[in-house]
Amino acid sequence: METIMRDRRAILVFVGPALLFYTIIVLIPIVWSVVYTVFEGNVVEGFTFVGFTNYTTLIRDPAFWQAFWFTVKYSVVVTAGQVGVGLLLALLYLFYLRKSSPLIRTLVFFPLIMPTVAVAELYSKMFAIQPVYGLVNAVLAGLHLDGLIQPWLGQAGTAFFVIAIMDIWRAMGFYGVLLYAGLVDIPGDIIEGARIDGASGWRLVRYIVLPLLGPILFSALIFSLTGTLKVFDTIYALTGGGPGQATTPLTLAMFNTAFTDGQYGYGSTIAFALAIMCLIVTLAIFRSARRDVA
Amino acid sequence: MGQTLTRPTSKTQVKDELQTRRPFSMKALLSRITLWILIALLLVVVLYPLIWMLLSSFKTTDDFASAPFWSLPTTWQWQNYVNAWNSGMSTYFVNSILVVFPSLFLNLLIGMAAAFGLEVMRWRGSNVVLLIFLAGIMIPAQMLLLPLFTMYFQAGLINNRWSLILTYTAASLPLTVFLMAGFFKNVPRSVIEAAIIDGASIYQVFYRVAIPMVANGLFTIALFTFFFLWNDLLFSLTFINDDSLRTIQTGLLNFTGQYGQVEWGPTFAAAAIAVIPTLVIYVILNQQVIKGMTAGAVKG
């Protein structure tokens, strides 16, 4: 038995192919990408060693900081929206809908699995002003709110707002289901007991439901925060980072730096900064989660 | 929360409750109505954009210009779909299938084997290797992009389906390995040991005993990975710029770039064509899809 379970050749046959693929296509590129940060150039023109120039450029680059703050703002707003609306949905599913809950859960979940470009296409037409009014401007015109009709995607402030709505709309059903699964696991008699003791509404949610939801809420937060820090598809397809650079997240700044400007070194430096951000956010949430439990 | 929690136990209590309930029922009715309005609002917010997209995909250019947004198409313009399909969507659709399914197959095959080797087989370092796989979930894809582009460029794989197949297979490995390892953990050791005592080799144990026992989990991961790969934009955008090789996401983007400004009908039809396969799978398998998509978040 032991010899069969410890058979080195069999272990190599099982683990080898995956480890080989993973090493060549994921692990080596990660290290390689960090090495790129002290070089500049691209595959066509070749590379030159530049030391820490890319890092000093990064710190003084207003375009980087603009993308950085956009990413932070977007992450905070959209995570609050996705997890917040998701929590409201989960409470709705559990306490108010019973028989119709599976159907509504299923419907609200669907946008998540739609191709992101199709979603962005839909939203760009919903908020369009040219050549004809999209859904939103048409509704405003129908309500005689002509003053509110505007090029939603052509202005920095409103474009941010449209992107945030789109990404909350896309993922809220996902967080609804995720948090609902957590709510179902809370023993019913704890909630009933709290109710008999007079807790209801917001107080019930704040003092009973949220603390008991702890681990799954943290996992939703990590998922949403790291997901929004890495946002690319929806913004690339909806606004392309515009107007100007107003809605350019770090991922897109990296993409443009590398492939439009041909600066692989500087692009890798931005990617590295993004990876560090993801790491810090995840560790910070883990630490605060541990403190909460203790 | 709008409902009574204590259950009446005696007749007097029932009577009491009926009496106290009468003024309450108006309030209960009101909260019921509020609830239904809330649900209706939710469904409008979620479904109306999708319905609008579907209806719009049948409209003529004149419909967009002159009829109000809520009107049905004056004539059902199936031609929009024909135009969208013939001006590229058919190619993108086929390309996505040719890239996604081989990747999915390879990913599941080697991912499942690795998970078996890491979880069931006994060797020092298996935990470390599992952690290394897990770490891949956190790394942004932007860190892989430039080295991979350089590699594929040197190897002549840019504008070649293999660049996508290789990348997709490897990039989706962390979650496959991690989740499959979790499923193998639940296979009772006694079953595996019994099979070995009966004379099965470790490979036979893998595909005759272990795989059938995790078939449900495998299916869940397959669905998750399918959507992850089918909806990829970043890698396809980076490694492919030949229009005849574009996948559904980059193809749709390109299609919109060409026709999207003025020709709304075909653009919506193209978007609908991109959505339909996911919709069909979702209608048939929605519970498994939901399970698959959330498994990654709970475990990761």
Image (cartoon, grey):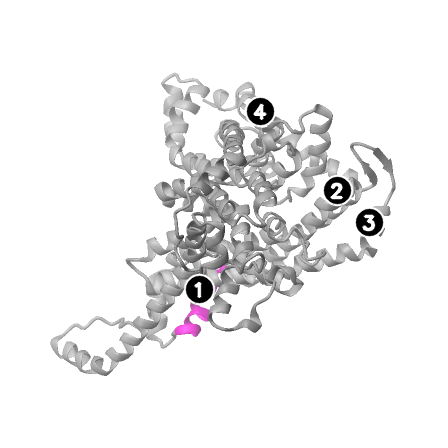
In front of the other: A228 or A198: A228
Residue A132 in the image: x percent, y percent?
54, 58
- Per the rendering, the mark at residue A55 is 3
Q: Can residue A264 be seen in this snapshot?
A: yes
Write down the chain letter for disc 1.
A
Residue carrying label 2: A258
Report the side of B113 relative to A255 (left or right): left
Amino acid type shown at disc 2? Ala
Asked if residue A278 is among those painted magenta in the image, a careful observer would answer no
C-alpha gap between disc 4 and disc 3 = 37 Å
Secondary structure category for the residue under label 2: helix
Q: Give the main secondary structure, helix, strand or loop, of the magenta stretch.
A: helix
For discs 1 and 2, the disc positioned in front in the rendered view: 2
Q: Residues within 10 Å of mark 4 (few under 14, many from 20)?
A: some
Secondary structure category for the residue under label 1: helix
- Per the rendering, the mark at residue A88 is 1
Residue carrying label 4: A17
- The numbered mark, 4 or 3, whose residue comes first in the sequence reads 4
Amino acid type shown at disc 3? Tyr
Write down the chain letter for disc 2.
A
Residue A125 in the image: x percent, y percent?
53, 55
Q: Which residues are magenta?
A: A201-214
For discs 1 and 4, the disc positioned in front in the rendered view: 1
Q: Residues within 10 Å of mark 2 (few under 14, many from 20)?
A: many
What residue is rendered at 63% in x and 57% in y?
A284
